[in-house]
Amino acid sequence: MDFNTLLRGALPTLAANNSGDPQNSTQGAFSDGFMESLAPLLGSQFNPLLKLFMLFYNLAGSRFGLDPTIILAVFGFIWAGNKLLRQLYMTVYGLSRDYYMADVHVSSSDDMYFHMMKWLASQPKMVNSRSITAETASKTAWEEEDDLDVLATRAIAADGSGVYLNFSNQEAKAPPRFIPALGTHGFWHKGRYFRLHRKQESMYDDGGSSGFPQFKDKENLIISCFGRSPEPIKKLLQHAKEQFYIDHNAMTIVKRPSPANLRRYGGRHSWLQVANRPVRPMKTVVLDAKQKVQVLSDMNEYLHPATPRWYANRGIPLRRGYLFHGPPGTGKTSLSFALAGVFGLDIYVISLLDPSLTEEDLSALFNSLPRRCVVLLEDIDTAGLSRAPDTGDDEKTTGGGNSEAGKSKDKAAKRESENKNDWKVADLARELKKQGDRDEKKGISLSGLLNAIDGVASHEGRVLIMTTNKPETLDEALIRPGRVDLQVGFTNATQEQAQELFERMYEVDRQISLAQNSIGGKKKEQVEAVVASLRQQLPSTAPLPGHQAAAVAAPIPVAAEPPSSPSAVSDKDWSISDGSTEVDEGEGDDHTSSAKTNAEEDITGGGGDIVEKEKPQQQFCDDIDLDASQISFAELKRIAADFSTKIPPNQVISPAEIQGFLLKRKRNPRRALAEVDVWVKATVQQKASKTKVLQVQ
Ligand SMILES: Nc1ncnc2c1ncn2[C@@H]1O[C@H](COP(=O)(O)OP(=O)(O)OP(=O)(O)O)[C@@H](O)[C@H]1O
């Protein structure tokens, strides 16, 4: 019995219509009577549907001469076939999943999840998938940007004063990142098909010590591939990880303890990446070569793969500690970063002044360190302050009972004892606040710190670097051998160090410029064209960014000083040469000699006082802002040597201060040399008078 016969049996009216006189009936058309008889059977809600079906049925039958029952039969078969195939697919897929597919699960609480997501976001096929999630991607300060974009913005913004960069558009320009959405995705990698299932689960979190129970979302990635072995997935994960760290050897990752509510999850939640900055080359840290080599070779030996066995055989805990001490801005932190860069280690920075850090946290943080890393405890001498009882604070600020403030404090205490019984609400509030402050300042005790650094349960393998400005104030227990194995002393800049700092500041620029010149290329030309056009728009009084004239503030009494040594600013010094070729002649000479005169006038300040010169800045820029890249190596060395003689030999100026001075003249070594005398004099004076306000920068 076919479907047609069935339908005829079930729908007698239709059968009558179809078998009746063709002249009186239309093929495939329902009579109104049939409709009416069917309507009550199906219920009123199906009436519109039934009518639509009738219309189609009548149309197919009367207009196109098709037997609608055949159409229905065909649709019926397609539907049933589809169901059957789906069922079959599900069975085969289920069987192959169970017996011929391997899975690897990756939890969002693991670093691997981020490696995989970053890799997927870089896959064009994934990005073009039909189901993706868009994320706002932020760039770090060190990521490459298109110079042309920035310059173009600058050019467009030029309205007479528009020679400054403008980044108001930077957020709009940052492209979003696309990652696979929740659900199932398929992708090919190295000729193999992988299936990715990204799912989200809600986890109940009882709130722990925070006491705020809540539901938290946790994600899982399930990566599958055909075959009984998960080996291809492992390789894929390894590949994603390698890609994630592809530029790692050029960068140093800096981590700090996570916020307290995240720390309690432990593991990778304990530390938060706060920076990923280019490796600091060791040669940029100006330090006595002997000391540098000593710390480098000590660390190298300690990190050697054979060292753990050596330590274990002798029952010595595998830990190494260094103490870097010296005045502020002498390179303690810089050396720590350079060391991390040399050995390709991440830096874990802990501030013991963090009020949310408890001793338990500190131990947990040390225990969740990776196998090899640098832990940096900065300004360790200040850590003790957090333990000082609150009552001591006042003493510190008043300088004991001898000063005026001390006397007024005594009076206040007397008054307080007189009014002992006369409590006001404000007094109560003050007391409560004091109590709160005391609780907050509990901090880390010395024993807590020692326990974290080298307690029985403490992590092994790390390199601990502690820095301090006041080594004498440190507790002996903290720096005993075993906790501090090597001390490195830093001092303010010697003349040799000043010379090295000077050469480093300008030498890098010179090298880059020479390299760029040798590369050539279209992009360089484009950039130069934009720069040239911008230079033309430069208003006559505005200095180019980075080309800052010496900021000389209100006159300060400085003893009259003879003009800076003529040899330091001789005519020869002002000629421009590129390599061995002298470039600047004729008109250039005029400019440079006038610059020299202006500079000398600035330094001597006429009558010997440092006074601000009202001078058209543009003229100053043209004359003196000669690029470091145009100076030969030999000449740069000579300027550096001259510069170093101007730095006081008694080490009163820190490398950080010299760097700050040079940074303000970062393209103009000659300008730095011309202005160093004034700056040194003002800086020494400022230090002697213990004022914090800089008169010359
Ligand atoms: N010896 C040095 N060689 C090169 N650069 C230095 C040196 N000392 C200081 N600097 C520069 O000065 C700045 C501050 O240096 P750094 O933070 O290393 O000093 P620090 O001794 O750790 O200071 P603090 O004791 O205040 O923490 C850095 O930008 C660094 O480049």
Image (spheres, rainbow, N blue to C red):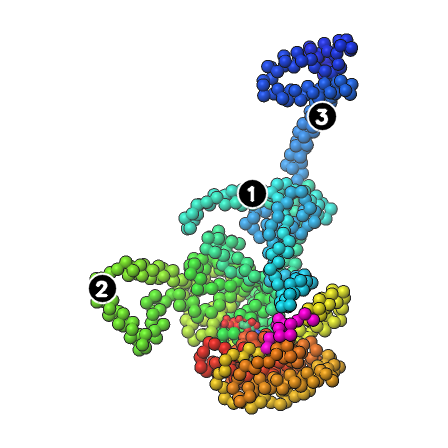
Q: Nearer the viewer, mark 2 or mark 1?
A: 2
Q: What residue is at 54 percent from the left and 75 percent from the top? A: 656
Residue topped by disc 3: 78
In the rendered image, residue 290, in percent from the top left (x then y), is placed at 58, 78
Q: Nearer the viewer, mark 3 or mark 2?
A: 2
Where residue 226 sits, quadrant-wise, is top right
Q: Is residue 315 visible?
A: no
Q: What residue is at 26 percent from the left and 69 percent from the top? A: 413
Extent of the magenta region: 536-549
Depth check: give the residue in front, 369 or 665: 665
Depth check: give the residue in front, 225 or 243: 243
Marks 3 and 2, the one that precedes in the sequence: 3
Disc 2 residue type (three-letter): Lys
Q: Nearer the viewer, mark 3 or mark 1?
A: 3
Q: Would you say 658 lies left or right of 509 here?
A: left
Q: Is residue 180 above or below residue 431?
A: above
Q: Would you say 408 lies left or right of 44 here?
A: left
Asked if marks 3 and 2 touch (Cβ < 8 Å), the reply is: no
